[in-house]
Amino acid sequence: MDSVDAVELRRVRLPLVRPFAAAHGTVTEREVVLVRVGDGWGECGALPEPTYTSEYVDGAWEVLRRDLVPRFLDGAALSEVRGHRMAKAALEMAVLDDRLRAEGRSLASWLRATRDRVPAGIALGFGEPVPDEPYHRVKLKIGPGRDVDVVRAAADCGVPLAVDANGSYGREDVERLLGLDDFGLLFVEQPFPADDLVSHAALASRSTTPVCLDESVTSAASAESALAAGACRVVNVKPARVGGLREAVRVIETVVARSGQVWVGGMLETGLGRAANVALAARPDVAMVGDLSPSSRWWSVDLTAPIEMDADGMLPVPAGPGLGVDVLPDVLARFTTSVEVVKRT
Ligand code: MG
């Protein structure tokens, strides 16, 4: 590969087809940080506010332009920078996309994916009805006081159900959460805060519903710790959350080696990040249905050709070189809010 002398950072602000329930209020558009390296594109999963993890759009932009891209251009290790996994994942994605495009190789092939389509799943917000569409799994948002009743209301929908609490329960709620065992759920995701493996282990030891971790797993090492502690049997793998696709593969291999199961989630990504997530989910060791929805669930206009669900509720795995999807220049131009080119000094 030719040496890279400059990296382009770009912010885009895209309209959502439906309001997204952020932790504090709802949002009707999604601002995204993009990274361009040669012909490759990367997408940063960070949300506008630090409400899911500590990363957020302004912070990711700053750490990319000031710390990560200069190190990359100098050939230094990105691991010198602590944390900021979503920003690192975006840079990794762009470099990988550029390299694979030059080689004429698909990301799916690089990831050792074996399927050409993957089942779609949907994560619903509070009060959102189960859609009459062929999803293979429905995940319901729950929280204290809005749990057993929420599940009971959806129990007859005919689609396998799971629940996600985003860490909203406390240790004292273990007994309450055992009430979920009546419903044969696929898993209960992240009932307790990210750093509380002990409560997760306490629930997992008594519950028949498998415990799944999301926010707690930021690396293969933390996945190993969680499994060793008996805190989960299932892991939601989001490449953005764990620092990129390479680490996501390490997480998957770590969990499967300990007889756990994995599925792939997302960060409300455009077609770029969605393409990468779908390719990852097409690996043979990703055994469970993920949160991967078609582009049209969120975007009225996507940055790439939309990734849509077929009549069987399946999403196609992009097969072209690199990410296998191309940024639409007119959409990019219309929705870009700022651009900065970081050059090697
Ligand atoms: Mg989650």
Image (tube, grey):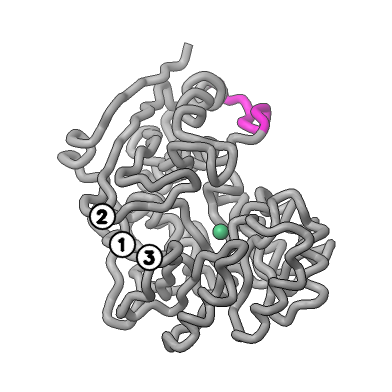
**Residue at image location 75% in from the left, 78% down from the top:** 207
Q: Secondary structure at mark 1?
A: helix
Left or right? Give the position of 219 relative to 90: right
The numbered dot on residue 293 is: 3
**Residue at image location 63% in from the left, 29% down from the top:** 77
- Tell me: is circle 2 under 8 Å from ligand 1: no
Left or right? Give the position of 209 relative to 334: right
**Which of disc 2 and disc 3 is earlier in sequence?**
2
Q: Which amino acid does the dot numbered 1 rest on?
A: Arg
Residue identified by numbered label 2:
17
The numbered dot on residue 297 is: 1
Q: Callout 1 environment at 10 Å: few (<14), some (14 to 19), or many (20+)?
A: few
**Residue at image location 23% in from the left, 55% down from the top:** 305
Q: Secondary structure at mark 3?
A: loop
Viewer-proximal residue, 302 or 96? 302
Q: Which residues are magenta?
A: 74-82
* Figure check: 191 above or below 16: below
Viewer-proximal residue, 108 or 159? 159
Left or right? Give the position of 311 relative to 93: left
Marks 2,1: beta carbons within 8 A: yes
